[in-house]
Amino acid sequence: MIAAEVVRSSHNLRICSFLPSATETIYALGLEDQLYGVTHECDYPPQAKEKPRLTSSALAFSQDSKEIDEKVRNALEKREPIYSLDFDALSKAAPDIIFTQELCEVCAVSFGEIHRAVSKLRKQAEVISLDTFTLQDILDSILLVGSKCGRTEEAKELVNSLNSRIEKASLLSRKDRVPRIFFMEWIDPIMTGGHWMSELIRRAGGDDPFALHGKNSRRVDWMEVRQYGPEYLIIAPCGFTVDRAAREAETLKNLDGWQDLPAVRNQKVFVADGNAYFSRPGPRIVDGLEILATILNSENKNYQHKFGSADYKRLAN
């Protein structure tokens, strides 16, 4: 009788997601019918855009990367919110469980604001923070969502499948010589890849000393990049699609010494969909690994890929 009640309870869970990556995981585990609210940034799978929105942004993302950075920094300095939470929508969703994060103020509604909103709800919800710094953390977060939502076995199957793809990409990417990579997570100011990017690059067959394993993305001076001389330059700004990254990357061509970079001379500058495959710590992070492996191992005839120009493309000189 107790077991039956537990199953029924898990089936009746009302879930809200304040993270696009958590939303992707929820759909991957077949829990979409129990999802009653998402953020304004939850756009994958496409059906997620039809769910009630719990947040909005104070930023106008039609601006370029420099203006966005300035607005974010000004908001943080003045302690002004970047995102707004719709309490009425949250109250209507009446969640039993909420997935969010404490890691980044720029990425989502603050953890404190969510807790304050939850304290005012008629029905108290469990708030779970999915803070991920490494690739293993991402896989563990999938297992945690599964265990909290009655999808433990499905989560294990998903993680096993992702691990198989990770190992396959890693094996096919092994080579005697490791090329120098620079992964650019933001264009103006120039920022390195953070958190899990170091491992993704290593597993894809490259080395990026600017990307520190498990650490935040950070600003880097262009002269450091120029002196380093990357053989591959991969530009995937956080939150940008391929086309937007390509438009923004045109400004880099005005930098001193741009044409002297080995990556530029050898036409190995690529733009990729950072929004879909690198910024979000969800199941598609493995697609990101496979994109990197495809770029760095184009000569490997054994490496088959499923990606097109909407996922990544070479930047014309």
Image (cartoon, grey):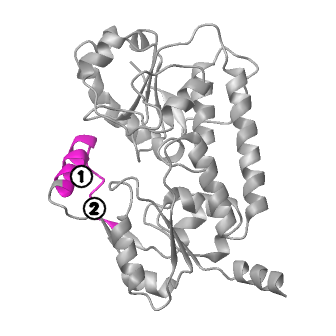
- Left or right: 74 with respect to 298? left
Mark 2: few/some/many CA within 10 Å (<14, 14-19, 20+): some
Instruction: Return the residue at label 1.
Output: 72
Above or below 47: residue 115: below
Segment tinted magenta in the rendering: 56-76
- Left or right: 128 with respect to 238? right
Give the Cα separation between the discs numbered 2 and 1.
7 Å
Identity of the residue drawn at 38% across and 55% down: 107
Asked whether residue 45 is in view, the answer is no
Above or below 277: residue 255: above
Instruction: Return the residue at label 2.
Output: 82
Task: Quarter of the image for the N terminus: give it.
Answer: bottom right
Which is more toward the observer, 45 or 169? 169
Q: Are marks 2 and 1 in contact (CB under 8 Å)?
A: yes
Q: Is residue 74 magenta?
A: yes
Residue lying furthest bottom:
122
